[in-house]
Image: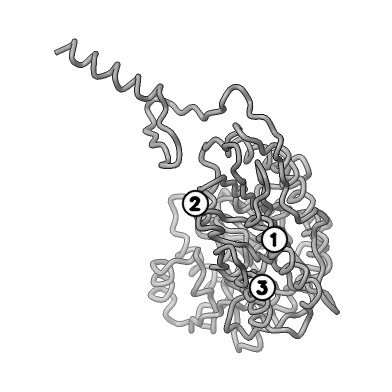
């Protein structure tokens, strides 16, 4: 290992992570493991790249020096960012899996017990088949989750990095709320959020902000698509700030008109759920206990809303396409996992289908402490109500090149200009014939 002081965490922190992982490797009677999940590689080495769609692997022997297999271009990331000394890069014309097999043999692991992440998105079945048929003398065993056992409880160094991410989250959310008004487009709101996050020191998040308005708030995981926000509508915002690949996230809601009784009731129910989380949640509770508590509060409503998803999920290191660690642990019914200090969750007691056609959210990212939990944020949770905001005289639209087909949403009026263009085209065709 190269001892250096320019990584995200101290050298001692990476030594601790590696030492604890090797204890788990020994526990499973393995001689080495092959890690291909980009979040796990980052956790162990500080390596990161947007080029993770190309095969990359961190090989950790039980005793000998770890080494990495990367595309030749990505070796620069190993050198610039990590403590890893040994690399075996492959060219774009090369065979990544053959390079892995050759390296395993080179370092005396060709006939050993080797664990690999069978459920990794970035080690597909085709490549797994190749290594099974090529490395015939080794015993290959699934070790999925062996790194995540260390990731689930964050160290205090990780918590501090997440607090940096939280600054970006809050900055983005405040900017998004501020710019919301009738006549503005969802894209402009998204742009304001992103700019504020980056100015606050945030980095490219695993998912750009979720921005939906009016009837589009009912569409799961929809985000800005150029729609113009209308008077009297609401805007749903979900922002995930990122720093050194660590994320925090929050939901908020903006009302561009009067706050109806149904929306007020929804606001108070979600606030009650979050207050109960902060009052009750502590180490020793099961995940299912927390989910049942939140679900019972949200489902006891008179506005027709439901909590149709899990009530929360682990959050931390993430690359696109998602900022959550829910595959490690999610707050849902029937999960008997026990809360421990250092766990971090995005708590989402949101309400889908208020009065049949509205979705709203107020959420929080929390850290489980020794005797309870605490938020990463300080922002107010109430809906932001803007009842007296004037509509700009000129309606904002997103102009697309004429060569790009664009179909208006059923919730949007057909542009008169589009009608004129179609009519003029028909007249020209008739004249030409």
Disc 3 marks which residue? 297
Tag 3 and tag 1, C-beta contact below 8 Å: no
Q: Position of residue 60 (x, y in %)?
A: 63, 73
> Disc 3 vs disc 2: which is toward the camera?
3
On screen, residue 22 above or below 427? below
Residue depicted at 54% across the width and 84% down the height: 113
Mark toward the start of the polypeptide (1 vs 2): 2
On screen, residue 312 above or below 186? below
Q: Position of residue 139 (x, y in %)?
A: 48, 84
On screen, residue 100 above or below 385? below
* Helix, strand or loop at mark 1: loop
Mark toward the start of the polypeptide (3 vs 2): 2
Mark toward the start of the polypeptide (3 vs 1): 3
Disc 1 marks which residue? 363
Q: Residue furthest left?
A: 433
> For the residues marked 3 and 2, what is the alpha-carbon distance in whole angstroms?
56 Å
* Helix, strand or loop at mark 2: loop
Q: Position of residue 385 (x, y in %)?
A: 72, 45
Mark 2: few/some/many CA within 10 Å (<14, 14-19, 20+): few
> For the residues marked 3 and 1, what is the alpha-carbon distance in whole angstroms?
14 Å
Disc 2 marks which residue? 91
Tag 1 and tag 2, C-beta contact below 8 Å: no
Q: Is residue 308 left or right of residue 86?
A: left
Whether residue 247 is visible here, answered yes or no, is: no
Residue depicted at 74% across the width and 63% down the height: 271
Q: Residue furthest front?
A: 261
Q: Is residue 315 left or right of residue 95?
A: right
Q: Residue furthest top?
A: 431
Question: Residue 248 bears which disc, if any?
Answer: none
For the C terminus, the quadrant is top left
Q: Nearer the viewer, residue 58 or 122?
A: 122
């Amino acid at each position: 290992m190269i001892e250096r002081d320019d990584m995200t965490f101290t050298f001692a922190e990476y030594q601790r992570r590696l030492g604890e992982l090797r204890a788990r490797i020994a526990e499973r009677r393995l001689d080495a493991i092959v890690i291909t999940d980009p979040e796990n590689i980052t956790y162990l080495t500080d390596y990161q790249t947007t080029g993770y769609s190309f095969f990359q692997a961190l090989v950790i022997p039980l005793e000998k020096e770890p080494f990495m297999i990367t595309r030749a271009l990505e070796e620069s990331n190993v050198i610039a960012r990590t403590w890893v000394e040994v690399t075996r890069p492959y060219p774009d014309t090369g065979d990544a899996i053959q390079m892995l097999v050759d390296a395993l043999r080179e370092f005396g692991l060709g006939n050993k017990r080797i664990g690999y992440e069978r459920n990794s998105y970035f080690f597909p079945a085709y490549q797994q088949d190749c290594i099974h048929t090529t490395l015939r003398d080794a015993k290959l065993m699934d070790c999925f989750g062996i790194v995540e056992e260390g990731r689930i409880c964050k160290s205090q160094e990780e918590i501090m990095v997440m607090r940096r991410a939280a600054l970006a989250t809050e900055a983005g959310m405040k900017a998004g709320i501020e710019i919301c008004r009738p006549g503005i487009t969802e894209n402009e709101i998204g742009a304001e959020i992103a700019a504020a996050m980056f100015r606050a020191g945030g980095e490219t998040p695993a998912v750009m902000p979720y921005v939906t308005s009016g009837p589009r708030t009912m569409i799961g995981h929809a985000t800005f698509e150029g729609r113009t926000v209308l008077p009297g509508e609401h805007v749903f915002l979900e922002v995930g700030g990122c720093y050194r690949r660590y994320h925090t996230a929050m939901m908020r809601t903006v009302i561009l008109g009067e706050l109806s009784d149904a929306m007020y009731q929804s606001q108070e129910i979600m606030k009650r759920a979050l207050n109960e989380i902060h009052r009750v949640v502590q180490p020793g509770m099961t995940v299912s206990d927390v989910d049942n508590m939140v679900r019972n509060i949200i489902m006891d409503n008179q506005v027709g809303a439901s909590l149709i998803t899990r009530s929360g999920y682990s959050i931390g290191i993430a690359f696109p396409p998602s900022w959550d660690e829910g595959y490690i642990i999610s707050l849902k019914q029937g999960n008997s996992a026990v809360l421990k200090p250092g766990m971090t969750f995005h708590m989402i007691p949101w309400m889908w289908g208020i009065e049949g056609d509205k979705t709203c959210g107020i959420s929080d990212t929390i850290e489980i402490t020794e005797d309870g939990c605490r938020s990463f944020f300080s922002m107010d949770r109430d809906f932001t109500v803007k009842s007296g905001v004037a509509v700009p005289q000129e309606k904002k639209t997103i102009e697309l090149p004429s060569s790009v087909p664009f179909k208006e949403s059923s919730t949007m009026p057909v542009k008169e200009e589009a009608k004129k263009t179609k009519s003029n085209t028909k007249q020209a065709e008739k004249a030409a014939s």
